[in-house]
Image (cartoon, grey):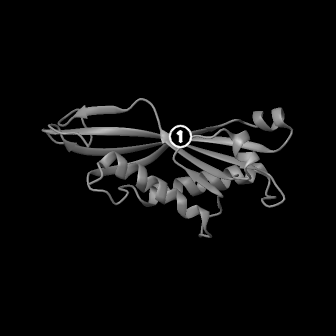
Amino acid sequence: MIHRRAQIVDALYELFAQLKAPTGFPLRVKTVQKRYVHWTSLDEQGAIPALLLNYGDNRRKRKGGPTAEHAALGETEESLPFALTAVLKETPEFPKPITDQVSDTIYTIERLINGTPDLDIDGVVDTEVEGDRNSEGAISALQGTPFEVIKFRVVVTHIYPSNTSV
């Protein structure tokens, strides 16, 4: 049996991995990984556009009851953050301007997450994109090539009995 946090990681990976094939979304990626790889390495491997999934920081747990949004007494509510990094580049294969690629990426990630808030996992009550930030062209200026790196903060909220772990 896989514990719930591992199920959540796998579900997020599978959600994003579908973007490697043609879908109805404007973003299509070459690479989806459960680890961070620097954008220069991805570029050398020809693996851009890429999505990289990692645990985020500031995991938050609350005991159930009046201080929790979803958990009842005897339950723990955990907000489990993930860092999703999108690496984009203008290339002959992806000639769309980088600003348009950023827009397509934000739209696609938000639609995927908003369309599956429970990730089809028992105990998961919400999944949301809390925010994103990008290099604002700094990498392009440094590299002399249209690159962009966007970091999304995805937070999965799930509940479980307080006398256990998941």
- Which residue: 67% across, 52% down? 103
- Which residue: 34% across, 44% down? 157
Residue nearer the viewer, 87 or 130: 87
Furthest-right residue in this view: 144
Left or right: residue 109 versus residue 138 is left
Q: Position of residue 63 (x, y in %)?
A: 20, 33
Q: Residues within 10 Å of mark 1 (few under 14, many from 20)?
A: few
Residue 62 position by quadrant? top left
The N terminus lies in quadrant:
bottom left
Q: Position of residue 42 (x, y in %)?
A: 70, 46
Task: Give the residue type at disc 1.
Answer: Gly
The C terminus lies in quadrant:
top left
Give the residue number, with chain letter if any, for mark 1: 131
Q: Position of residue 114 (x, y in %)?
A: 46, 56
Residue 104 position by quadrant? bottom right
On screen, 18 above or below 147?
below
Q: Position of residue 154 (x, y in %)?
A: 47, 44
- Which residue: 27% across, 40% down? 69
Residue 85 position by quadrant? top right
Left or right: residue 41 versus residue 146 is left
